[in-house]
Amino acid sequence: MAAGIYPWQLADRMPVIGIRLLPRDADVSLDLQAVFTRCYDTGPYRRRVAYDPARIVPALNPAKMEWVQQPATPP
């Protein structure tokens, strides 16, 4: 069994990673951003979580605050 590290910045799209289902199989691509977006959109999170950038502690710098307030883009 092998492990991998997939670093990315929070403002970047989540990566597509390879998942090996069986030892002799080739990797299958898994789009982490698509999985996260689907779970967020179809689960209760969009309806229940009230994001308020003004309540973030410590406060964000202006560039990050602008990024936080952008509407989400579909994968």
Image (cartoon, rainbow, N blue to C red):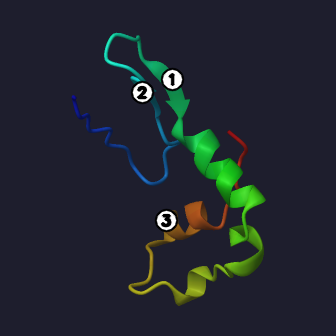
Q: CA distance from mark 3 to mark 2?
A: 32 Å
Q: CA distance from mark 3 to mark 1?
A: 30 Å
> Earlier along the polypeptide chain: callout 1 or callout 2?
2
- Mark identifier at residue 19: 2
Q: Compared to 19, does 75 lie above or below? A: below
Q: CA distance from mark 1 to mark 2?
A: 6 Å
Position of the N terminus by quadrant:
top left
- Picture quadrant where residue 47 is located: bottom right
Position of the C terminus by quadrant:
top right
Determine crowd level at label 3: few under 14, some 14-19, many 20+ residues with C-alpha closer than 10 A.
few
Is residue 71 visible from the viewing direction of this image? no
Q: Looking at the picture, tell me which residue is in the foreground, 57 or 34.
A: 34
Q: Which residue is mark 3?
A: 64
Q: Which residue is mark 1?
A: 29
Please, what secondary structure does the residue beneath circle 1 have? Answer: strand
Q: Locate residue 24, reporting x and y percent.
A: 33, 10
Left or right: 66, with 46 as reference point = left
Q: Are marks 1 and 2 in contact (CB under 8 Å)?
A: yes
Q: Which amino acid lies under the numbered mark 1 shown in the image of this protein?
A: Ser
Select label 3 or label 2 by which is in front: 2
Q: Compared to 57, does 49 lie above or below? A: above
